[in-house]
Image: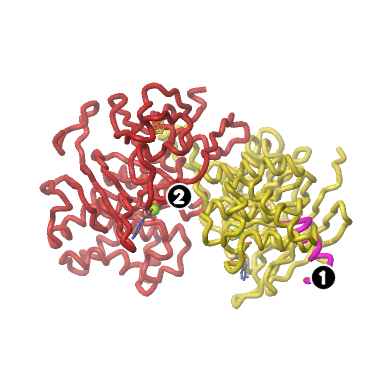
Chain colours: A red, B yellow
């Protein structure tokens, strides 16, 4: 498939395509494969959710895509509107910088990701100052506009970040990421540190901005319910690999990978009457320095057959719009989330 | 309806902290009852005073936190007002770790890095239960196996840093329950864990509760965990309990506007993706120099000066066993709009 191929069912254009993306960290002469053979397509205007437990490679994926770290192998084709499409991994430093305005990242920790010695105005304006030649009035106008869009109070522009609450700081982080008017934004646990009432404000803001500005998101989170709420499609990762990828409702209601099933059943529903049939996985995620052979999930999988211990199941299409990496995906009848509508 | 004597009754608990900006009223008149063998959940957003409340029970808050009120503990071995006991008194040492024990979010704080897990569990047994080191060791191995640690006879001689996060959480639970306490206080025990490990830990806690019959005081900011673990729920906001009742009623008929706001702001699986989340306007104020009237007033969608600010709001029994600190709370059918 060419990197510009439209999505067959919907005619959506891809904005970002990864091919065989791989990242190996080496430490003390040991190799850790944090991300392996990752092929992903993100279409323009969609929100691709990425879920999985800590250490499964979500941050590594996000940072490789934006080239905040150098992937060991692979390609990242990026096709923003109005500029030629490129493989980000093949760009020289200078060209990469020019493309950075179109692809930005929002981080988890609103406390540590903002420089405490800079005013809010300077924090937000910095990406513009660093890269482009704007006059002072132009700069001020661009900053004022993004401050308005993110619901910050313009009167507070000359204060320092410590004067703000967690939710306000996350708005500042979002304003900084969006001031260059990127087309593609990676949100890495962007609402995970916030209390629920404030988290709801930021989730609503991210969604409004996406619609108003026509953004595409890669939305990384360990929280299944937040990902479900925001994403149009979702991929589930385990030990550095994508194990399942589908439209959101499809993935949550009819999962095709045993790990997804277990993850969904473990999520505590805020409903005392939810008919829970919790699947308790045995043990913990294996040490990534010494991953199991065959299917990476097989030591904890309740459906495993002998083949699972020896043969790696590739991520493959089970239906047109639903991919899973499980030898038995066609045969298992797994349980998803029960909702009012399916009940 | 008469209820059995609670195992623990907290009354008018207040905790003041002297800070450079003035007296921070972190806990402002908390009443709670925990019944034998049952689980009471305490839920609220960060900073509302959950940890200070729970630590006051064991008398382990730092010295700059001044507590008043009473904490009546009706144990099988006798009754005490825990708040009236002198820190370090023989009674409190006989209660802490033996009749009431506590687990935390961060298991590393429960263990010393210098001693093996086995030594640390045995030490508690030698203090409270037995003088025989071999008996203590056998009991420690047994309890580690009970919380799901594989090959406990080998693991017992390892140090905390040799355990993974999930295993250390189990070991902390083992240490907390090895003396079969009457009350286990769990302060955000699974907040730092991944969901599949969280599910394991919650299951272990439920099994142990059934087996040993202990009461659990379960503290969390997560409504999902509350729904799956608790019999009764207390909702805390700005140092006060704003709602208290049986878990089903809290979720199906929340009475306080804060509880309603909290429940409405959680994304739920299966909800319509187009639906916007409700959020609570504004943010939690710093509890310094607050008025005695309703703490939620500035953020409340139902706020009405003439009704809400007339006097401090008591915790009102709106339905039998279901309390709310709101003048506008009404049984069945909700509030005045
Ligand atoms: N700089 C690094 N050096 C070595 N290992 C790393 C580094 N960053 C991450 N890892 C490892 O790579 C794996 C994936 O990490 P990460 O992408 O941060 O996962 P997630 O974001 O899903 O929690 C983990 O096993 C982690 O320990
Ligand atoms: N030792 C302390 N010194 C000063 N302030 C404190 C101290 N401990 C807690 N606080 C403050 O008291 C309030 C309640 O804290 P805490 O009980 O830890 O909240 P929670 O557990 O609900 O998140 C917070 O505003 C917190 O900042
Ligand atoms: S391939 Fe085998 S071990 Fe892996 S998820 Fe499928 S059934 Fe389980
Ligand atoms: Mg991460
Ligand atoms: Mg706390």
Horizontal relation, residue B35 to residue A77: left or right = right
Tell me the SS state at disc 1. loop
Q: Is residue B44 visible?
A: no
Residue at the image point whose x is 16% and y is 58% from the top: A96
Does residue B90 show up magenta in the picture? yes
Horizontal relation, residue A96 to residue B336: left or right = left
Residue bearing mark 2: A201
Does residue A126 show up magenta in the picture? no
Q: Which chain letter matches label 2?
A: A
Nearer to me, A241 or A232:
A241
Task: Read off the magenta span.
Answer: B88-101
Residue bearing mark 1: B89
Residue at the image point whose x is 66% and y is 33% from the top: B333
Residue B159 in percent (x, y) is at: 57, 62
Horizontal relation, residue A136 to residue A28: left or right = left
Horizontal relation, residue A225 to residue A248: left or right = right
Query: Toward which corner of the image does residue A113 lie, by quadrant?
Result: bottom left
Q: Say which quadrant the C terminus of chain B sits in.
A: top right
The local crowd at label 1, few if under 14, some if 14 to 19, many if 20 or more residues have their Cα within 10 Å, is: few
């Amino acid at each position: 498939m060419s990197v510009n191929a439209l999505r067959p069912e919907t005619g959506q254009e891809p904005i970002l395509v990864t091919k065989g993306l791989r990242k190996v960290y080496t430490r003390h002469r040991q190799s850790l494969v944090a991300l392996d053979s990752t092929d992903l397509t993100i279409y323009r205007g969609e929100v691709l959710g990425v879920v999985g437990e800590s250490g499964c490679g979500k941050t590594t994926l996000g940072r490789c895509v934006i080239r905040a770290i150098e992937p060991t192998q692979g390609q990242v084709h990026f096709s923003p509107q109005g500029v030629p499409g490129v493989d980000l991994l093949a760009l020289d430093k200078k060209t990469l910088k020019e493309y950075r305005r179109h692809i930005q990242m929002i981080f988890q920790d609103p406390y540590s990701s903002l420089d405490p010695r800079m005013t809010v105005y300077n924090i937000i304006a910095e990406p513009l100052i660093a890269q482009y030649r704007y006059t002072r009035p132009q700069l001020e106008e661009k900053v004022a506009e993004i401050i308005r869009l993110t619901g910050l109070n313009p009167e507070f522009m000359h204060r320092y970040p410590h004067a703000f609450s967690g939710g306000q700081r996350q708005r500042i982080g979002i304003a900084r990421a969006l001031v260059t008017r990127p087309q593609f934004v990676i949100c890495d646990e962007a609402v995970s540190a916030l209390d629920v009432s404030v988290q709801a404000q930021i989730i609503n803001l991210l969604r409004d901005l996406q619609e108003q500005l026509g953004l595409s998101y890669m939305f990384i989170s360990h929280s299944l319910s937040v990902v479900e709420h925001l994403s149009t499609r979702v991929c589930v990762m385990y030990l550095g690999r994508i194990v399942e990828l589908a439209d959101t409702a499809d993935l949550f209601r009819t999962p095709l990978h045993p790990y997804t099933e277990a993850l969904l059943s473990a999520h505590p529903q805020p409903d005392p009457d939810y008919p829970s049939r919790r699947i308790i996985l045995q043990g913990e995620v294996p040490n990534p320095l010494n991953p199991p052979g065959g299917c990476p999930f097989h030591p904890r999988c309740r459906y495993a057959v002998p083949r699972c211990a020896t043969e790696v199941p590739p991520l493959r299409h089970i239906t047109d719009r639903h991919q899973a990496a499980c030898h038995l995906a066609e045969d298992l009848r797994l349980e998803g989330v029960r909702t009012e509508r399916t009940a | 309806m008469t209820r059995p004597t609670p195992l623990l009754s907290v009354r008018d608990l207040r905790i003041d902290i002297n800070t450079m900006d003035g007296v921070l009223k972190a806990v402002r008149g908390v009443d709670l009852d925990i019944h034998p063998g049952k689980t009471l959940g305490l839920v609220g957003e960060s900073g509302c005073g959950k940890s200070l409340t729970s630590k006051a029970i064991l008398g382990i808050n730092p010295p700059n936190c001044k507590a008043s009120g009473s904490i009546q503990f009706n144990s099988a071995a006798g009754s005490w007002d825990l708040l009236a006991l002198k820190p370090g008194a023989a009674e409190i040492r006989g209660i802490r770790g033996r009749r009431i024990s506590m687990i935390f979010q961060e298991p590393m704080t429960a263990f010393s890095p210098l001693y093996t897990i086995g030594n640390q569990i045995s030490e508690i047994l030698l203090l409270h239960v037995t003088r025989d080191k071999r008996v203590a060791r056998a009991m420690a191995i047994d309890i580690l196996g009970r919380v799901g640690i594989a090959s406990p006879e080998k693991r017992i001689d390892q140090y905390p840093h040799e355990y993974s996060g999930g295993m250390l959480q189990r070991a902390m639970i083992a240490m907390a329950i090895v003396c079969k306490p009457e009350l286990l206080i769990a302060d955000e025990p699974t907040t730092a864990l991944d969901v599949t490990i969280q599910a394991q830990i919650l299951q272990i806690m439920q099994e142990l509760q059934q087996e040993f019959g202990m009461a659990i005081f379960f503290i969390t900011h997560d409504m999902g965990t509350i729904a799956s673990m608790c019999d009764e729920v207390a909702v805390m906001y700005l140092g006060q309990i704003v709602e208290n009742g049986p878990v089903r009623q809290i979720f199906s008929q929340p009475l306080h506007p804060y509880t309603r706001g909290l429940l409405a702001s959680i994304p739920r699986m299966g909800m319509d993706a187009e639906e916007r989340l409700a959020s609570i306007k504004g943010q939690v104020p710093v509890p310094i120099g607050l008025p005695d009237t309703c703490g939620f007033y500035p953020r409340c969608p139902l706020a009405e000066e003439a009704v809400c600010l007339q006097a401090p709001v008591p915790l009102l029994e709106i339905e039998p066993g279901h309390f709310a600190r709101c003048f506008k709370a009404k049984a069945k059918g909700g509030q005045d709009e």
